[in-house]
Amino acid sequence: MHPTIQSTLDTLRERSRTSRAEYLDQCKQADALLPSRSRVSKTNLAHSYAAASEQEKSILRQTQSSPNIAIVTAYNDMLSAHQPYYRYPEKLKAFALQHGATAQVAGGTPAMCDGVTQGQPGMELSLFSRDVIALSTAVALSHNTFDAGVYLGICDKIVPGLLIGALSFGHLPGIFIPSGPMHSGISNEEKGKVRVAYAEGKVDEAALLESEEKSYHSQGTCTFYGTANSNQMLLEMMGLQLPGSAFVSTTGALRDKLTETAMQHCIQSSLHAETGIGYILDAENILNGVIGLLATGGSTNHTLHLVAIARAAGWDLRWEDIALLSEVIPLVCKLYPNGSADVNEFHQNGGTPAVIQTLLDSDLAFGQIRTAYQLPFAQTAKLPVAVDNGNITWLPTQDITKNESVFRSAGTPFSKTGGLKLLTGNIGKAIIKVSSLSANDLSHITAPAVVFESQQDIILQFKQGKLNKDFVAVLPGQGPAAIGMPELHKLTPPLTSLQNNGYKVALITDGRMSGASGKFPAAIHLTPEAIKGGTIGKIRNGDMITVDWIKDTIHIEVDPQTLEARPPFILPPTPQTLGRNLFKSARNHVSAADQGASFII
């Protein structure tokens, strides 16, 4: 194993010694060889399967030997990625019966889409929805009549929320089941150009809508490599989802067989001791997730989610760990917005199994981790390609011809370092995604600050032609304790347009930019946030700021005494309508961004 990776593992284990031991004790207290429902009174038990079929009841009565699997679903038919889950429960129930078990829909969770709420008030609920999903998952499992769980979720906060909730019942085995991506429409690059043209006033709303409809056109996951698809890669890297299953088409025999196979593995896991998802999610699994994120240039949102997930399992993962690994993990994929390829092309080049294989070949990932499907991780770098005589045909990824503009080996990567960096300095610490930056000779930007009250303020000044200059856009008051840390993706078209026109621009914010971040430097997740006394709240127009992604620094050229004398940041009035009033307690209790931005962990 690469010495930096090994030392990061050793540090994580030592730092988490007490918290991990306490978590495992909790799992062991809840664990038993017998099915969970064998410990439930007969009155409770009868009530739990009153609506089941007679065939299911005959199995459910056998509490000592027949597993009952919880289905926790994030289905809704507004999200294209989750719409295919509509028929999954009945399929999963049928698959369970075929293998001598039963399955019940234990509960549902909310599932919102950042793509729909961009720039809308609902975006202020987005990050907090992760913790609501975790709570909903725990409630779904709370009846204690289940022996394992299958989790149906794809998108941004949904997978992390489901996983955090599942870890609160860490003694239960569990596996995640994807639904697959939509077929490729117009290219993501073409879609981005139309968005910039619209921001510049060169095309109208009708043209913009036509472009968006050609991009988002059917059931399935969006095809760009944002947070949703980064989720799917992470689950495979951490051994919690069948290898190569993430980006198989939403329909067809292969998708159904993979779903059945996942259920079969979940049933088998439930029959053995200490196979719960909490036991499986060891330090190596967590670090494999970080390594996969860096190697593929995945979503910046996971610098929040991976920290929160790790802590839910007793692991004290920190941004500094991610930064250390980023220095030695090569970038082996070019996927939009880091490149032009979408996830369907990624799958054609071997997908996550190909990433796993090249990392293992170079001793850059852990091959001995336990998996939710009870197979050796090092032997699963294969892609499911077809169903033959009822069995899945698995193709070794080395047998797949690779397009070098999409995928390269760890020995000949696109970049020798990962896609994410940690910036530190007298403004605080922030995350920057360097893998998506435009190819130029810049290593840093030093420019005067222009401070904005909102992203709408930036868009308005852009349209008025006031931003045709070199500057660092400073947007405070977007952090988790302020307004829930909304995603600021609507800033991508105007700031990209300014950069395309030759201006040197950067963004500093305590908000988020997501996996769909643009090709301009954005120092995001800044902590301490403005409302907590962070320096970002004391920056004034004209202050000279340097964002340096080679030296990994973020600096304001103002002496400490002057900064200290400036008045504290005051959050502009925010309407408490459209659900935002219900999340006041969450804003009051949320942890800092570098601690996962969670109000429950």
Image (cartoon, rainbow, N blue to C red):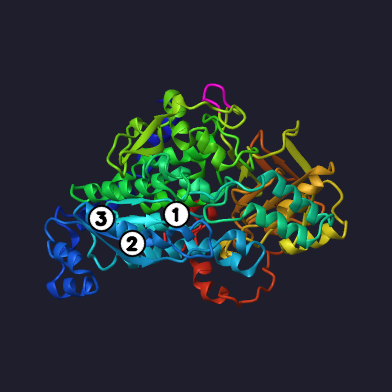
Residue 244 within the magenta-colored segment of the rendering: no
The crowding category of the residue bearing disc 2, from other C-alpha atoms within 10 Å (few below 14, some 14 to 19, many at least 20), is: some
In the image, residue 300 lies at what x, y percent?
A: 57, 47
Amino acid type of the residue that numbered disc 2 sits on in the rendered structure: Glu
Amino acid type of the residue that numbered disc 3 sits on in the rendered structure: Ala
Whether residue 324 can be seen here: no
Q: Which mark is residue 90?
A: 2
Cα gap from disc 1 to disc 2, whole angstroms: 25 Å
Q: Nearer the viewer, residue 451 or 18?
A: 451
Question: Of label 1 and label 2, which has the lower sequence position?
Answer: 2
In the image, residue 69 lies at what x, y percent?
A: 26, 58
Question: Of label 3 and label 1, which has the lower sequence position?
Answer: 3
In the image, residue 144 lies at what x, y percent?
A: 23, 65
Q: Report the quarter where the N terminus lies.
A: top left
The crowding category of the residue bearing disc 1, from other C-alpha atoms within 10 Å (few below 14, some 14 to 19, many at least 20), is: many
The magenta span reads 408-413
Left or right: residue 377 compared with residue 408:
left
- SS for tag 3? helix
Q: Which mark is residue 427?
A: none
User: Which label sits in the foreground, 1 or 2?
Assistant: 2
Q: Report the quarter where the C terminus lies.
A: bottom left
Cα gap from disc 3 to disc 1, whole angstroms: 25 Å
